């Protein structure tokens, strides 16, 4: 599988190198010799982005924007390092995320809670601030232009409260970050794509997730680019699938709300069973081992997010 996938409309996906091949996508958009980078991967992803741009004849000075869908470190951890390579670029980010880019201390602390300090440092390295004057806040309805090509930002909470979907008016396509599920290319079969929601902590909100799924589908894009991993089509059908799967995960969580000390382990097992069952329901031939080779880490994180949602729900 290639480190770079070129699509139509000057859009490409670059493998960030995070965790395993084709786990985490960074997207490039090239228009009239200028470029935007959508999401950044980690610090380790910087050479991959620079190499992809070089292959396309784009100099670092011709990058006008680094656009973040949200500030989770697997998608924004390399933002400062990339911005240091691009002298003319501005960083776009949801207003709730802007402060974390200018001062990443709370973002780092939150990531340490999920992974532990040693693992966090191994995966992400040093997270440095971005100069505030280089940051553009993008609330709902904001837009920027790349060589005359307009990108509109839509607030899409559910996965995180600092999340935007980026609508590219040049192609009609949407960059959805983590708010339109995960779809790993190694599970493609017969031209079809499997998709499944991501309910990771700490801000998973199923009601908001449903609304945001509808909002993205309501833009009627021919294609959506998810961070895990890149282009999906048949958007309306996939939205309906995501709604059903999300309801199934919420039902699983509620059934285990009072499960006691082994609740998390049972949530992990239940999420993994659900993913495998959904693959079979969709008519794919993959074995359980093949499915979980792609999704087992997400089963763990999805279970964590469901657990945090249950605890937060019971506190309110």
Image (cartoon, rainbow, N blue to C red):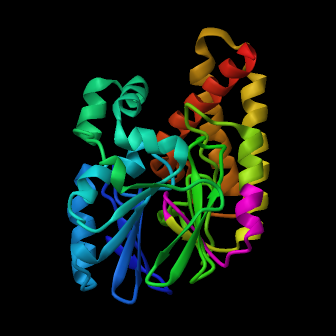
Query: What residue is shown at x 65% (from left), y 33% (from top)?
Result: 270
Residue lying at the far bottom in this picture: please name it: 32
Residue lying at the far top in this picture: please name it: 261
Residue 145 covered by magenta stretch: no
Along the line of sight, the residue nearer the viewer: 266 or 145: 145
| 287 horizontally vs 59: left or right | right
Q: Is residue 190 visible?
A: no
Along the line of sight, the residue nearer the viewer: 274 or 119: 119
Span of residues in magenta: 213-229
Placement of the C terminus among the 4 image quadrants = top right
Residue 214 covered by magenta stretch: yes
Query: What residue is shown at x 41% (from left), y 23% (from top)?
Result: 113
Residue 249 higher or lower than 189, as above or below? above
Residue 106 higher or lower than 150, as above or below? above
Placement of the N terminus among the 4 image quadrants = bottom left
Query: What residue is shown at x 79% (from left), y 50% (from top)?
Result: 244
Q: Position of residue 32 (x, y in %)?
A: 39, 90
Query: What residue is shown at x 61% (from left), y 24% (from top)?
Result: 308
Q: Position of residue 48 (x, y in %)?
A: 25, 65
| 31 horizontally vs 244: left or right | left
| 120 horizontally vs 184: left or right | left
């Amino acid at each position: 599988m290639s480190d770079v996938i070129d699509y139509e409309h000057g859009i490409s996906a670059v493998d960030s190198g995070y965790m395993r091949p084709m786990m985490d996508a960074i997207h490039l958009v090239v228009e009239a010799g200028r470029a935007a980078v959508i999401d950044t991967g980690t610090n380790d992803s910087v050479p991959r982005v620079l190499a992809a741009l070089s292959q396309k004849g784009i100099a670092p000075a011709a990058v006008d924007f680094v656009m973040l869908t949200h500030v989770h470190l697997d998608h924004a951890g390399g933002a400062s390092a990339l911005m240091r390579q691009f002298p003319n670029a501005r960083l776009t980010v949801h207003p709730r995320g802007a402060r974390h880019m200018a001062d990443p201390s709370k973002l780092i602390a939150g990531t340490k809670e999920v992974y532990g300090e040693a693992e966090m440092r191994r995966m992400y390295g040093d997270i440095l601030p971005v100069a505030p004057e280089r940051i553009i806040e993008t609330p709902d309805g904001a837009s920027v232009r790349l060589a005359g090509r307009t990108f509109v930002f839509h607030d899409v909470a559910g996965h995180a409260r600092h999340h935007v979907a980026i609508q590219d008016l040049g192609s009609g396509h949407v960059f959805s970050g983590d708010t339109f599920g995960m779809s790993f290319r190694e599970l493609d079969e017969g031209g079809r794509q499997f998709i499944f929601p991501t309910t990771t902590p700490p801000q998973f909100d199923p009601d908001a997730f449903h609304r945001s799924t509808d909002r993205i589908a309501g833009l009627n894009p021919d294609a959506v680019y998810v961070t895990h991993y890149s282009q999906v089509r048949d958007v309306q059908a996939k939205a309906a699938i995501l709604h059903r799967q999300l309801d199934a995960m919420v039902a699983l969580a509620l059934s285990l709300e009072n499960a006691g000390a082994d609740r998390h382990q049972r949530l992990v097992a239940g999420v993994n069973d659900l993913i495998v069952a959904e693959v079979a329901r969709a008519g794919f031939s993959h074995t359980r081992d093949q499915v979980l080779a792609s999704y087992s880490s997400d089963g763990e994180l999805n279970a964590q997010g469901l657990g945090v949602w249950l605890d937060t729900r019971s506190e309110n």
